[in-house]
Image (cartoon, helix red, strand yellow):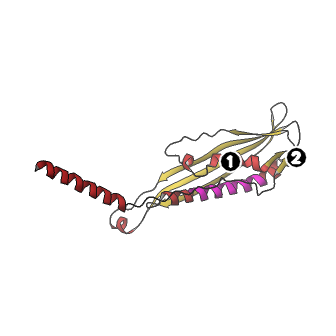
Amino acid sequence: MPAMGGRILVVALAAVAFTLGACQTPAPPRPVYPPITFQDQDPIRLNVGEVVVESRYQAPGGPPNVDHLFPARLLDAARRWPADRLAAAGAGFKAKFVILDASVVAVPLKASSGLTALVTKDQSERYDARVAVEMRIVDTFGAVVASAQAEAKRSRSVREDVTLSERDQVWYQMAKDIMGELDRQLDQTIKTALLPYIL
């Protein structure tokens, strides 16, 4: 009899586990977002022999930074900007595009307490993003003869009940907004500060 009782218990536990598993709804797949590009903008033709990209920013890859988790990373978008917007159409001089920052930092926000916490959904985190770059014209001796800088910032907060897909959407929109602002700044400042080197 003890053996039979043990067998019944095992069967019962297996049935419960199967029922619980059948009730669980698989999480929907997280959407895949396209890379941020600038190919819809006219290229800026420079009187230089080549355009080189240098990144001085290295993603820490861990808290409090979250830029490495973005569905469209700011560093990748910043690297793509000169490829899409700058055209070397001269000889001799060199254009150097330097990425100084492409970070996003998560900042925890203070949660409500007491009765307020029971009836409200708090903003649990704020994401502070910053992209900063410098554009340099370098002569044949390696000296910087002209330069232009641009910087863009964005901040967004999310509620404590945000899903992974919703957070990805917030991050992607942040990346699009900040890179759109950087594109506008660079277009203006390059055409002003580097005017002698534009064809």
Residue furthest toward the top? Answer: 141
Where is residue 188? Give x, y as percent.
Answer: 78, 55
Q: Secondary structure at mark 2?
A: helix
Label 2 sits on residue: 196
**Residue drawn at (32%, 64%) of the image:** 114
Where is residue 133? Give x, y as percent.
Answer: 70, 45
Q: Could you tell whether 153 is left or right of 82 in the image?
A: left
| Badge 1 density bin: few <14, some 14–19, many ≥20, Cα 10 Å | many
Per the rendered image, the range of residues in magenta is: 171-187
Q: Are marks 2 and 1 in contact (CB under 8 Å)?
A: no
Residue 156: mark in rendering: none
Q: Could you tell whether 94 is left or right of 166 in the image?
A: right
Q: Earlier in the sequence, mark 2 or mark 1?
A: 1
**Residue drawn at (14%, 52%) of the image:** 5
Residue furthest toward the left? Answer: 1
Q: Amino acid at mark 1?
A: Ala
Q: Amino acid at mark 2?
A: Pro
Magenta-drawn stretch contains 181: yes
Question: Considering depth in this image, is 192 or 159 the residue closer to the camera?
Answer: 159
Label 1 sits on residue: 78
Instruction: Give the answer, above or below, for where 62 lies relative to 181.
Output: above
Where is residue 19? Give x, y as percent.
Answer: 31, 60
Magenta-drawn stretch contains 92: no
> Can you tell which of label 2 and label 1 is closer to the viewer?
1
Where is residue 145? Give x, y as percent.
Answer: 82, 38
Query: What secondary structure predominates along the stretch shown in magenta?
Result: helix
Distance Cα–Cα, label 2 vs label 1? 24 Å
Q: Secondary structure at mark 1?
A: helix
**Residue drawn at (57%, 51%) of the image:** 70
